[in-house]
């Protein structure tokens, strides 16, 4: 049984005593404690595949920041790897794939991943659940099919993901076949995370904002919607970065929570999305570079705008690695101490 289920109740639209808070990228380089554990295994992929270490860094922000949820330490790119496209994480550069998808044959060769392919993640989840002993819920996650597709075609990060977008225009058939394979893999993966103990899940569509509204419906939301329909036992958060144009459409899918980034006006978002979804977000991660007085006043302004019903406080994207750990803690405390 969970001792703190604020996030689950907020996700379902139930009453909460105070606003719950967690942070995207709360486990990571902002914490000297993370960097210390990370030093033990220099290679990121190997680190992610070591359940004991993944579990340890998952729990760190719960103890250090006092957030209302843990998020399992892993990466969205474990799915391409399980499907047959291994990745490397290059220091100061980001993800890199030796092989990318170019032809129908390449898509055919990929497998649909099953839960067992990702035992290292589900093993980490089991360890975390044991260690947390009901202290806070554990968030499982995956990338949205479009964002995973973008990395599998492009082979690395990119400002424009123009190779991935080129594929949508030049070979929509291949694009849909690949997106469906990623979707089926993701559903298997998220189900395995839930069986192992994930109490809710978040789908990260980090590259949503580079598609047109029409493309977004056809190549992204359609597949996110399939995932949401397949996952029926836990609350679902969908975070589509920069997809301000998709908010109304997103309100129609079968999820409980919609994540907003800081470019999205709060009251306008509420109007577009309606009262039947919980909203999550949306402080600019750069706010945490400001002094404490500014962090406090801006955070309180945000909390007042969202209101105390159907709301989970968070940033509008992941923490930047050079953020001061004390500022992160101050943000979390500001949310936890706030009363209307
Ligand atoms: O605390 C948490 O949020 C859980 C852990 C987590 C990581 N990646 C660990 C990580 C989560 C939820 C992710 C998701 C992820 N990974 C996304 C979606 C969220 C977003 O930020 O938009 C994306 C696009 C990726 C792909 C990825 N992984 C990139 C582009 C990079 C390099 C950029 C960077 O920050 O260095 C990573 C590496 C990565 N994933 C790190 C961490 C902590 C940093 C690498 C390190 O510790 O050496």
Image (spheres, helix red, strand yellow):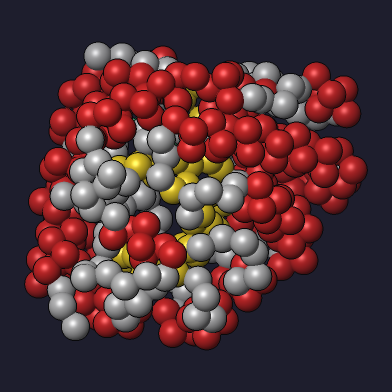
At a point 36% along the width and 50% down the height, the residue shown is 24
At a point 70% along the width and 51% down the height, the residue shown is 226
Relative height, residue 278 to residue 52 (above, below): below
Q: Residue furthest front?
A: 1
How many marks can you see? 0
Q: Image quarter for residue 250?
A: bottom right
Relative height, residue 123 to residue 234 (above, below): above
Give x and y (percent) for residue 189: 58, 32
At a point 58% along the width and 65% down the height, the residue shown is 243
Q: Can residue 246 be seen in this snapshot? A: no
Quadrant in which the N terminus is drawn: top left
Q: Image quarter for residue 290?
A: bottom left
Q: Can residue 337 be seen in this snapshot? A: yes
At a point 18% along the width and 59% down the height, the residue shown is 332
Give x and y (percent) for residue 116: 57, 19
Give x and y (percent) for residue 55: 30, 27
Quadrant in which the C terminus is drawn: bottom left
In the image, taking residue 78 as reference, residue 85 lies left or right, namely right
């Amino acid at each position: 049984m969970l001792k703190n289920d604020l996030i689950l109740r907020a996700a379902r639209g139930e009453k909460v005593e105070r606003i719950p808070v967690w942070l995207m990228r709360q486990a990571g380089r902002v914490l000297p404690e993370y960097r210390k554990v990370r030093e033990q295994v220099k290679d990121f992929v190997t680190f992610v595949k070591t359940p004991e270490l993944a579990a340890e860094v998952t729990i760190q922000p719960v103890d250090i920041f006092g957030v209302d949820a843990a998020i399992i330490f892993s990466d969205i790119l474990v799915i391409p790897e399980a499907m047959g496209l291994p990745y490397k994480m290059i220091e100061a550069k980001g993800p890199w794939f030796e092989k990318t998808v170019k032809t129908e044959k390449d898509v055919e060769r990929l497998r649909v991943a099953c839960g067992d392919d990702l035992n290292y993640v589900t093993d980490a989840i089991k360890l975390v659940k044991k260690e947390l002993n009901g202290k806070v819920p554990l968030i499982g996650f995956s990338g949205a099919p479009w964002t995973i597709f973008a990395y599998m075609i492009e082979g690395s990060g990119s400002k424009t993901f123009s190779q991935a977008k080129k594929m949508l225009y030049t070979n929509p058939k291949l694009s849909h076949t690949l997106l469906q394979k990623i979707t089926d893999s993701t559903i298997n993966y998220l189900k395995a995370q839930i069986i192992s103990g994930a109490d809710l899940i978040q789908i990260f569509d980090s590259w949503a904002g580079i598609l047109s509204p029409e493309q977004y419906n056809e190549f992204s939301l359609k597949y996110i919607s399939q995932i949401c329909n397949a996952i029926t036992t836990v609350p679902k958060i969908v975070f589509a970065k920069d997809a301000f144009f998709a908010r109304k459409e997103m309100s129609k899918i079968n999820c409980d929570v919609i994540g907003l980034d800081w470019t999205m006006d709060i009251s306008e978002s509420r109007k577009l999305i309606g009262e039947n979804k919980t909203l999550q977000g949306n402080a600019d991660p750069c706010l945490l570079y400001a002094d404490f007085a500014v962090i406090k006043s801006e955070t309180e302004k945000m909390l007042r705008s969202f209101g105390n019903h159907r709301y989970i406080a968070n940033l509008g994207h992941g923490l930047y690695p050079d953020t001061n750990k004390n500022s992160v803690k101050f943000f979390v405390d500001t949310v936890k101490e706030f009363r209307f």
